[in-house]
Image (cartoon, helix red, strand yellow):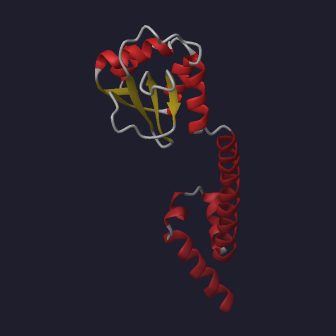
Amino acid sequence: MADEKITKAAEKTAKTTPAAAKAPAEKKTAAKKPAEKAKTTRTTKTTKAVKAAKPAATRAKKSAKTAVTLDDLTTAIWKKLEKKNVKDIPYAVAIQVNVFEIGTFYIAVNADPEYDKQVIQSDYYLADGIVDTSAEEIKKIASGDYDFIAAVKAGKFNYRGDLNKGVCIAGLIK
């Protein structure tokens, strides 16, 4: 008699749960044992969480290896400027470059009497222009053929300041 009461209570619970109502008829019999169902659900959630965590950990390791630093960006820009002749530029030019989530550096030409070209990791409070962009855009600039106008139109490259001096630096880097 006690077994019959337990069976009826289990059937009532199985009929009233939303998951049981949506399940096909043969799966409703599995709902008669609520303790077993809860156990398998918990195991499934844990297994899914572990499986989801593995790719995330792999992505984190890959991004840590390929993370771009400010040193990488300034070195790439310096390599583009290093052998350029700036003696024909009659004025000093200093452009500050703010790289999203990485830092700030500046490019200076004829700004210091000791050096004709500089690429330094620092703010430049007397900058002729300020660039706001991402590390990917700086990499593209350093790699060579970069369309500044298309990047500005697309919103990937923002420039504020003396446009003539910005064009001068862009011409040197290209």
For residue 14, above or below residue 137: below
User: Left or right: 26 with respect to 133?
Assistant: right
Where residue 42 appears, as percent x and y from the top left, is 66, 68
- The quarter of the rendered structure image containing the N terminus is bottom right
Give the residue displayed 54% in from the left and 75% down from the top: 13
Residue 16 can be seen in this image: yes
Where residue 25 appears, as percent x and y from the top left, is 60, 58
For residue 18, above or below residue 96: below
Give the residue displayed 46% in from the left and 10% down from the top: 87
Name the residue at the bottom extreme. 2
- Asked whether 1 or 42 is in front, the reply is 42
Where residue 122 appears, as percent x and y from the top left, is 47, 40
For residue 43, above or below residue 124: below
Name the residue at the top extreme. 88
For residue 35, above or below residue 43: below
Q: Quadrant of residue 170?
A: top left
User: Left or right: 61 with respect to 95?
Assistant: right
Give the residue displayed 64% in from the left and 81% down from the top: 7
Where residue 164 appears, as percent x and y from the top left, is 31, 15
Q: Quadrant of residue 129?
A: top left
Residue 1 can be seen in this image: no
Name the residue at the front extreme. 113
User: Left or right: 72 with respect to 125?
Assistant: right
Label count reads: 0
